[in-house]
Amino acid sequence: MAIDAARLEMLSALSRKVLWLSSWTIHHANHIRPNSDGLKVGGHQASSASLATIMSALYFHVLRPEDRVAVKPHASPVFHAIQYLFGHQTRDKLENFRGYKGAQSYPSRTKDVDDVDFSTGSVGLGVAQTLFASLVQDYVQAHGWMKDRREGRMIALVGDAEMDEGNIFEALAEGWKHGLRNTWWVVDYNRQSLDAVVREGLWEKFETMFRNFGWDVVIVKYGKLMRQAFAEPGGEALRRWIDNCPNALYAALCFQGGAAFRKHLQDEIGDQGEVTALIDRRSDDELLALMSNLGGHDMESMLEAFERIDHERPVCFIAYTIKGVGLPFQGHKDNHAGLMTVAQMEKWRASQNIRPGHEWEKFEGLSQDPAALRAFLADVPFNRDGARRLSAPTIDVPERLDFKPAAQMSTQQGFGLVLNEIARGDSELAARIVTASPDVTVSTNLGAWVNRRGLFARAEKADTFRSEKIPSTYNWDASPKGQHLELGIAEMNLFILLSALGLSHSINGERLLPVGTLYDPFIERGLDALNYACYQDARFMVAATPAGLTLAPEGGAHQSIKTPLIGIGQDGLASFEPAFVDELAVIMAHGFAHMQREGGEGGSVYLRLSTRSIDQVQRIMTPDLQRDITEGAYWLRKPGPNAEVIVAYTGAVAPEAIEATGFIGESRRDVGLLAIASVDRLHAGWTAARKLRRDRRGVQHLSHIEKLLAPLPRDCGIVTVIDGHPAALGWLGSVRGHRLEALGVEHFGQTGTIDDLYRAYGIDANAIIDAAESLTSGAPVLHRKMAV
Ligand SMILES: Cc1ncc(C[n+]2csc(CCOP(=O)(O)OP(=O)(O)O)c2C)c(N)n1
Ligand SMILES: [Mg+2]
C-alpha cells in the first residue's frame, strides 16, 4: 500500500524531531541541568537513536488505540519524546529525565505520566509480556468480555541483544502451544549490545526458530536510497558487498564515515566501470547517507513492512539499524555509554536549524507549517480513543470463604478445598478467577478446580482419556470457556502470564483474578519475572507449595529456605504462611479483595503453603480473629502477666510450637504462643507505624505486633520458629527489646521424614524447649518430646 507522499514527508519530519528531542533530553540531563553529575547517563543516546524512525512510524501512523506496546528499556527517551509531541509528557519531566520524579530512565507504568502500557527494564521480560498479554486478550475474548472493543496488537520493541535472554525462548514455545496471534516483535537489529558487536550469523538461527514456531518473519534490511542504488548499473555488486560485510566492519565504517566507506568499496568491489561510477557519483556525505540507509532508518520501508501484514499470526520484524544513527558515535562499539560532547551537540543543533534557547519547541527547525503539524498530531489514530488506561469494577468477595473441614489437613489441601467450593458456586468471583500452573496443577491441589472449571483453549479439545473412557481422577477437557491455563514447566512464564492476567483490568477493561501455583523453591527460578510483575503493579495470587523442609523425602533440591525473606522483601506482594486451613480461608478472601484495591492500598498475594497434614484447631472464626490473621498474628495461647518466655511460630511448624509450649509451660510461668500468619504484614505494619510516629510527632499509632507484644514483661524471652530462614522472624526481638532465639533452617536440606529433618535442623519441639531454657533461668524443663 503506497503511503501518501505528503504524509510520508510529515512522518519523516516528525521522526527527525523525535531523534532530536530524545537526544536533547539526554544531553540536557548530562550537560545542562544543574547538579546533574550523579545522573550521568550511559546506554540511552545511541540505543535510542537506533529506534527513532521505527517508533515514529508506529506511534504516528501504524498504531491503533487498542494496540499495546512494550518499549525497549533504553528507548525510553524516544517514547517520552513522542508523548511530549502528543502533549502527554511535560517539558519539566523531560528536563528532569532520570532525576527524582522526572521522566523515568526505563518506561514505567506506575511512575511515568505518559501512559506507558508495559514497564520494561530487565531486558527480555517486557518482550515476553506482550506475548502473554495477547494470550490474555484471547482469554477475555473467548469468555465473551470484549464487548464492542477491538482486538489490539501486542507489540514489543526489542533490542537484538535482548534475544539472548532465555525467557524469550520459553515464551515463544508457550505462545506456540496456545495458538498465539496479534503479537508483533520488532527487533532493532543494530547488531550491537552493551559491550560489543553481536556474533555473526546469530540472526539466521533466530529466524529459523521463529518460523518454526509459526511466526511470520519480515526482514527490513534496505532503505529506499539503498534500493534505488541497487537498481542502478553496478547496484547488484553493492548489494552483495553490503550483504557480505561483517557486522563489526559495517559498524566501524558507519562510525568512520563516507570516506572510509569509499575506500573499502573501491578496494573491494571497485571495477573502474559501473560500480566505481555508482560510488563516484556520490559525495562522502551522500555515500554515508546511502550506506546508513538501512531499513530501520527508512520511514517508507518501515511503513510498508508494517502495512503489508494482513493476518493475525505473530510477526517478528527484523529491522536493520545502526546504533547511534545520525549521531557522531554511530556504529562505534563503545557507544552504549556514549554521550555527545557539548561541541558535537552545538554542531548537530545547527545542522537541525534549531536556535539556541528553542531546543524544546515542538516544531523548531522543521520546514513544515506548524499548524499542519499540530493538526497531524491531533489526528494520529493511536490517540483517537483518549486515555488508554482502562478500569474495571471490583468483583465482590465474601467476608469468608468456605471449605469442607477435616480434623487433619494441610494448607495445600485446604487451598484446593477453598477453590473447589468457589468453583461449585456461580458467583462473579468464581467466573473471574483464572488459574495457571507450570506443569504442577495436580500436585499443587488445583485438580478439583480444573475438574469443575475446565482447561482454557481457544478451540474445544476433548480429554482423550475421558473420550476413551479410561478412568482418571481428572478431567482435562479444554474449551474457550475453561478457566485454567496449563503451562509448561518454565516458572518465568508463569510469572509473566500472571503479570499479564493481573493487568487485564487496565489493559482490557475486564478484571481477572489470577491464581498461579508452583513449588515454593521454584519461585527463585521465576524471581525476576515475579519482581517485574509486582513492579508494574499487576495483581495476582500465587500459591507456592510445598514449602520448606516439609517436602522432606524429596530432599534439598525441592525444599525452600529463603522464600520467607523474599516474601518480606518483595514490594507489591503481601505474603502469608498460615498453619491452619481456617486461617487460609480468611487470607484467601482477604487476598482476592487486596488484589483489587486501588493504588498503594492493594497488591499481589503470596501464600506459602505446605503438604504437611496437621491437626486443625476447632474454633469459631470471629471477626476479631479474622482481622488479626490478616494483620499477621494472634495469640493462640495468651501469655500471662508474668510471662517468662513466649514461642512465636509461623506455618507448618505449628505442631512443634504447640507441643513445646505445653512442655515449657510445665516449668516456666505464663508462657504464650504467638501464631504468625504473615510475618510480612507484621513487619510492614511495624515499619509503617514507626515512620508515621516519626513523621507526625504526637501520633500514638501502634502497629499490630507492638500491641501484641506490649503486655510482655521486659525480661520475657522470645523463641521464634519457622520452616525457613530464621532471619525472617528474628527481628521480633527489636519490637520491644526482648531477648530472642531464632530457630529456622540455614543449610541445604536432606532426604528423610519431616520428624528426622525438623530434629536435624533444630526446629522440632525439643529445639524450641532448649531455646526457651537458654532464655530463662530456673530448673530445666521437666519433660521433652520422646524420640520416635
Ligand atoms: C536482565 C538484564 N541484564 C542486563 C541489563 C543491562 N543492559 C541494558 S541494555 C543491555 C544491552 C542491550 O543491547 P540491545 O538489546 O541490543 O539494545 P541496544 O542498546 O543495542 O539498543 C544490557 C546488557 C539489563 N537491563 N537487564
Ligand atoms: Mg543492539
Image (cartoon, rainbow, N blue to C red):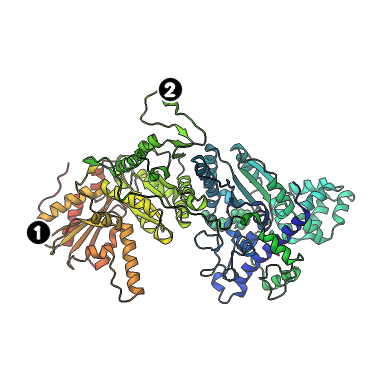
Q: x, y (%) of residue 441?
A: 39, 38
Query: Is residue 243 visible in this depiction of the protein?
Result: yes
Q: x, y (%) of residue 538?
A: 46, 53
Q: CA distance from mark 2 to mark 1?
A: 69 Å
Residue closest to the eye, 123 or 84: 84
Mark 2 or mark 1: whose residue is earlier in sequence? 2
Query: Is residue 760 visible in this depiction of the protein?
Result: no
Position of 765 with respect to 466 (left or right) is: left
Image depth: mark 2 or mark 1 in front:
2
Q: x, y (%) of residue 262?
A: 81, 57
SS category of the residue bearing label 1 = loop
Residue closest to the eye, 113 or 185: 113
The yes-or-no answer for disc 1 within 8 Å of ligand 1 is: no
Residue closest to the eye, 235 or 686: 686
Q: Residue at x 43, y 40 (%)?
A: 483
Q: x, y (%) of residue 651?
A: 27, 50
SS category of the residue bearing label 2 = loop
Q: Residue at x 28, y 60 (%)?
A: 730
The yes-or-no answer for disc 2 within 8 Å of ligand 1 is: no
Q: Which mark is residue 468?
A: 2
Amino acid tagged 2 = Glu
Q: Is residue 751 above or below residue 85?
A: above
Number of numbered discs visible in the structure rendering: 2
Neighbor class of circle 1 (other Cα within 10 Å; few <14, some 14-19, many 20+) is: few
Q: Quadrant of the C terminus?
A: top left
Location of mark 1 (residue): 779
Residue closest to the eye, 430 or 101: 430
Q: Which mark is residue 688?
A: none
Q: Is residue 571 above or below residue 206?
A: below
Image quarter for ligand 2 equals: bottom right
Amino acid tagged 1 = Ala
